[in-house]
Image (spheres, helix red, strand yellow):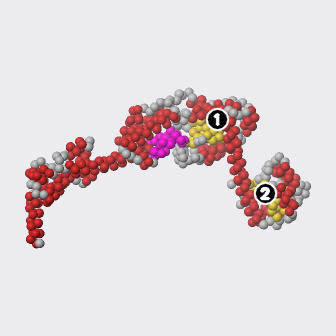
Amino acid sequence: MQWNRAILVDDEVFTRKGLLKLIDWEACGFQIVDEADNGEDALELIERLQPDVVITDIRMPVLDGLELIRRVVTDDMVKPYFIIVSGYDDFNYAQQAVRYGVHDFILKPIDETEFSHALVRLSERLESDREARVREERLLSGALMESLIIGEADETLLYEWEQRLELLPGDRLFYVFVERNDHPLASANDNDGGRGEFKDRVEEALLAISNGEQPFYLHEHRNRIGIIVPGSILQSFQGCQRGFARRIQQSLADSEQERIFVYFGRPVSTLSLIQDAYETAKEALLYKYIYDESGMVIHEEASVHDLQYIGLEERLYQQLLEQIEELHFEKLEGTIRSLFESFQEQLYAPEAVKTAINQCVLGVVRVLSSMDGDQSRLSSLEPMTEWHDRNLSLHGLKRLFTDFAIESANYIAQLRKEQHKGGIQKIRAYIEAHYHENISLKGIAGKFYMNPVYLGQLFKKAYGMYFNDFLLQLRVNEAKRLLRQTDLRIYEVAERVGFGNPDYFVTQFEKMERMTPSEYRSRLMREAASEGTNA
């Protein structure tokens, strides 16, 4: 916790010591850093220690409390908050105190609870002031940095920044991007994505590297942090940019998946040329996937390579789609590995990688659409279509794409199963509508473009009986209906239900019903006659 610094000013030593014991200063957010027994000594302490709060009596020798406050308020020095502690309940003092902007007026004898509450309120106000100053400083620094990197800084601004950065004569200057990749909580829809917290961590890392001796100003560039780095800082790393980058990476990565990338622009000799350093740092970003293993891109080294803006190799694309559809997971992972290796080996620019990945995603979506699939059921589809709005390393992108490909393959298998289920239902409906015709398993399989053996197995799995048994049951049930409801002859019934040979019909009927068609009809006649007699 950051304590607020306070000094006590009172000419009575017992009053000061009493206050020190009476109040739990740390619980109220304060630390007493010094004491004074007169206003003149207090003035020197304020100039030297620059406290946040001064707690002072009114009546003191040499320089009284109100004069002390007036001098501090009117002179060009730090402006602490004042709390007056006095035994003189004098309205005139209060009026003057208000005029000088005194924060509070506490009467003696001091009430511990009242004074503690006043200190807590003041501590909250000081914290709010600090946060406001940080925001203001960041906004101001951001505006000034913008002027520098777009080349609109005048001589006065350049001089101000040289003083701020404490630049040494002849020191080289780098513009450096620090970028967090594969952050598990970041998303395309997250407006902040934890950038404020990440910026604070970068600042802490830089302070640790320089032992707090080198001021740095950081600038947020949407999803990465930009820094002006003096070359003198690299001396701790034998002048090596990679050593500095590695230290930044080690300081910032806070999970196994998260990776920190560092991009160095070309060094420049003066702050007036920082725009060139910034532009070359932006160019270094284009080599991100080429240097995915180290996460360090040095413009001077990277720029000797010519980036490629080429399309995806058709063989890999077709192979990928086939393996997704065929559920060949081992081969699929191998193809994805080859795909991402080609991005590096062939020096794909980020835009070319984006185009290739989007082509693959679109190809999968087309397959799903052709099978009447619901794209929204793929949880990986949204991250896959928005990945380019996030910071992903090539390894992180590969992991995301692999998850998408495997989920898509499993969903396609599910759709195919559902289609087969729907298809077997169509086949059953066809059999039920055409059982009286000369149909066969082979003929139906041909009609529905299926293998007869596979269709037979599928039918048995779906309905618990083989095709021939199902067809025979349909025909015999219909024959029984005709025997009950018509006076058609046996051979006519056989024809009606799809038997070309009446003798075969009789044999199959007897097999199913344990009696011939004639016996079945005779039994019905006897039962009818018996019912008539009983009536």
Mark toward the viewer: 2 or 1: 2
Q: Label 1 belongs to which residue? A: 175
Residue 513 in sight from this viewpoint: no
Where does the magenta region start and end?
380-403
Closest to the observer: 488 or 255?
Answer: 488
The mark that comes first in sequence, 2 or 1, is 2
Residue appearing at x 50%, y 29% in the figure: 308
Q: Label 2 belongs to which residue? A: 103
Image coordinates of residue 77 in percent, x first then y, are: 81, 47
**Compared with residue 91, is residue 173 higher up or lower down, i.e. above or below?**
above
Residue 14 on the magenta span: no
Closest to the observer: 48 or 83?
Answer: 83
**Compared with residue 78, is residue 16 higher up or lower down, i.e. above or below?**
below
Residue 402 on the magenta span: yes
* Three-letter amino acid code of the residue under disc 1: Tyr
Image coordinates of residue 468 in percent, x first then y, are: 19, 50
Instruction: Please tell me how crowded label 1 is: few (under 14), some (14-19), or many (20+) other residues with Cα within 10 Å.
Output: many
